């Protein structure tokens, strides 16, 4: 087989002729999960394809394989394809091979990671001494998750039965994680220290309960009852103290902090023991679920890219956004009754004096817990909420996977399911941006798909205000009323805000769920993208076709967050850059694809 050409087409991974990549025969998605070795190798290839080799035209599809070159090292790689994709997000299978003379030699994930390390060092001129260790950490975590994965619970069906069991099963089924992140399951610490708190192992555990002198409690609320989920009923709290629930893993990480040890010795903080109610770990790891509410804790643990703690400005920002957004969210709920946002009306934390005066920031942020509304407050009766990331998973790892939803069994009913879902999801996100200057982040882990008894979409729930931002020119007065350190992180400029919306909505969410449907019915991929174009076109026609929407409909490149390069450059997620993907939304592409598949 010849080596890959120095330049392929503009569509990352499309055939070198420029023909849309719909003609490659598709094998059925395997029922089993890949090994940790293959999973890590495939995510690294996904990142290379999207952020490095694809944009530099160093890829091609040839006889059922993706060929990919790292040009600065002149390394040529190959992997077998299960299915090609119009947006270049192909499905891989089996090990990666490296060109070796006139043949191909299989390589493991470690050698592939070393190739990535070498290529990025040459490309950026900046080495990253953490990278290989983080990939190894991700591999170790993936292997531990796969080995510790509980047996599937057939009773937790997505349609019918107990909706709470089905919902929780969806939250805890993401055993492989984000397939366009170089270290999607990386977590600091030995697996033995975190598996008992991990969603992938089905973790449920009680909270650690602290009593804190009332004058040492930091708290903000959007309304008087907002903090009620933090006051555990039946727990005796000494007079003059307030209850502060703590994540037991976080307490383990902070127990030796000098300020905390001194407060315990003085009696300013008392350890009451553990509660009686088990809380379940959700997909984000640090957010825990009960029937009444979600509690978003800090964890001094790096998960994927970031240390997962609630910064001081995020604690106040959650409550500030809940207040500021109320009129806009009420308007959107009235116009789009099939979409609702879970609000975050309170936080509570520990405000001990620091060693140099003021409040000890490490403890304030470390013990900060944000209250998020429970599902029952917004969920439509008779529906079952399912995590969108579980529905769209590349592999059918849990009962919420799209392949388990009855309407998606046939190609025509799958198209109807898809059209109904897009009508629920897309218009309110666009209206939030254009009508209210709000940047939602509806990526797969921030959205719940609520299905009716037949498995059809009936509602979407958006969550996690940490990613919700304001366009400053639309909210200048409200932002001016906030402390500067709270207001600044709540904003994106118009360009960054639009990139974030389009990436989260279309690239991270819509394209990935579309891919899961196309795995089931490869012949309808172009039809699925036509439905995306339809809902965008209809919204544009009804709202004066804003130029940004006109650009999408014309096939302007789509922004994709550069997770690999962001991790390499050690940037915060807020500062992540974007690469531009050739769009499958242009009418000419869809027409050619439809014609090609006949």
Image (cartoon, rainbow, N blue to C red):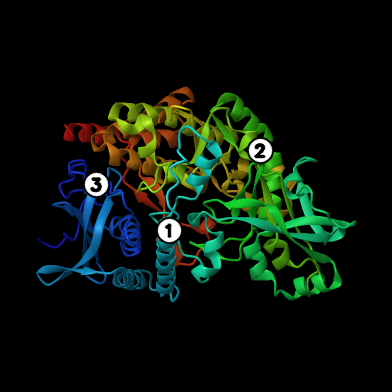
Q: Earlier in the sequence, mark 2 or mark 3?
A: 3
Give the labeled residue for mark 1: 563
Regarding residue 598, the answer to whether it shows in the image is yes
| Residue 59 falls in image quadrant | bottom left
**Residue 267: image location, x then y, percent:** 85, 68
* Residue wearing tag 3: 84
Q: Can residue 183 be seen in this snapshot? A: no
Disc 2 + disc 3, Cβ < 8 Å = no
Labels 1 and 2: the sequence-earlier one: 2
| Direction from residue 447 to residue 131 in the image, left or right | left
The residue at 47%/41% (across/down) is: 156
Under tag 1, what secondary structure?
helix
Of the two numbered discs 2 and 3 in the rendering, the one whose residue sits closer to the viewer: 3
Q: For marks 1 and 3, give the CA distance.
A: 22 Å
Q: Relative to 438, does residue 95 appear above or below in the rendering?
A: below
**Dot 2: what SS?**
helix
Q: CA distance from mark 2 to mark 3?
A: 41 Å
Residue beneath disc 2:
325
Look at the image and tell me in which quarter the N terminus lies: bottom left
């Amino acid at each position: 087989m010849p080596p890959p050409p120095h330049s392929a087409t503009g569509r990352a991974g499309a055939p070198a002729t420029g023909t849309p990549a719909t003609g490659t025969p598709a094998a059925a998605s395997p029922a089993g999960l890949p090994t940790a070795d293959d999973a890590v190798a495939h995510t690294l290839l996904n990142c290379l394809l999207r952020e490095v080799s694809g944009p530099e035209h160093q890829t091609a599809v040839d006889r059922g394989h993706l060929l990919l070159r790292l040009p600065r090292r002149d390394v040529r790689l190959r992997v077998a394809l299960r299915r090609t994709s119009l947006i270049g997000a192909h499905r891989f299978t089996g090990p990666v091979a490296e060109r070796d003379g006139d043949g191909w030699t299989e390589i493991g994930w470690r050698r592939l990671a070393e190739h990535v390390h070498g290529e990025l060092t040459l490309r950026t001129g900046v080495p990253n001494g953490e990278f290989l260790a983080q990939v190894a950490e991700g591999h170790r975590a993936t292997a531990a998750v796969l080995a510790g994965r509980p047996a599937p619970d057939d009773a937790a069906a997505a349609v019918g039965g107990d909706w709470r069991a089905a919902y929780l099963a969806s939250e805890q089924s993401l055993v492989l994680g984000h397939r366009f992140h170089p270290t999607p399951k990386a977590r600091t610490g030995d697996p033995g220290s975190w598996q008992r708190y991990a969603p992938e192992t089905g973790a449920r555990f009680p909270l650690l309960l602290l009593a804190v002198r009332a004058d040492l409690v930091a708290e903000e609320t959007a309304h008087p009852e907002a903090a009620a989920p933090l006051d555990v009923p039946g727990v005796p709290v000494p007079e003059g103290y307030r209850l502060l629930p703590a994540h037991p893993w976080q307490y383990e990480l902070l127990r030796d902090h000098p300020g905390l040890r001194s407060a315990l010795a003085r009696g300013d903080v008392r350890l009451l023991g553990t509660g009686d109610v088990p809380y379940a770990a959700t997909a984000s790891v640090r957010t825990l679920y009960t029937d009444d509410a979600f509690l978003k804790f800090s964890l001094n643990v790096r998960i994927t890219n970031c240390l997962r703690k609630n910064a001081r400005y995020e604690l106040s920002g959650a409550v500030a956004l809940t207040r500021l957004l109320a009129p806009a969210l009420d308007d959107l709920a009235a116009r789009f009754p099939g979409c609702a946002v879970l609000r975050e009306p309170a936080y509570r934390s520990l405000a001990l004096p620091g060693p140099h005066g003021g409040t000890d920031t490490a403890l304030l942020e470390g013990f900060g817990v944000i209250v998020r509304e429970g599902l029952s407050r917004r969920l439509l009766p008779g529906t079952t909420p399912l995590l969108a990331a579980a529905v769209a998973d590349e592999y059918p790892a849990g009962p919420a996977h799209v392949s388990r939803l009855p309407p998606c069994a046939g190609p025509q009913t799958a198209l109807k399911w898809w059209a109904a879902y897009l009508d629920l999801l897309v218009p309110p996100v666009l209206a939030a941006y254009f009508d209210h200057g709000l940047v939602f982040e509806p990526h797969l882990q921030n959205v719940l798909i609520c299905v009716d008894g037949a498995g059809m979409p009936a509602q979407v729930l958006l969550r996690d205000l940490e990613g919700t931002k304001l366009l400053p020119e639309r909210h200048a007065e409200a932002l001016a009323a906030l402390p500067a350190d709270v207001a600044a992180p709540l904003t994106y400029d118009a360009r960054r805000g639009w990139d974030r919306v389009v990436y989260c909505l279309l690239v991270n969410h819509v394209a990935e769920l579309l891919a899961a449907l196309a795995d089931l019915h490869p012949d309808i991929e172009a039809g699925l993208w036509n439905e995306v174009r339809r809902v965008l076109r209809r919204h544009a026609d009804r709202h004066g076709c804003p130029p940004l929407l006109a650009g999408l409909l014309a096939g302007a490149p789509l922004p994709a967050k550069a997770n690999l390069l962001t991790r390499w450059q050690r940037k915060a997620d807020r500062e992540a850059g974007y690469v531009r993907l050739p769009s499958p939304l242009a009418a000419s592409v869809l027409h050619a694809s439809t014609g090609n598949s006949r």
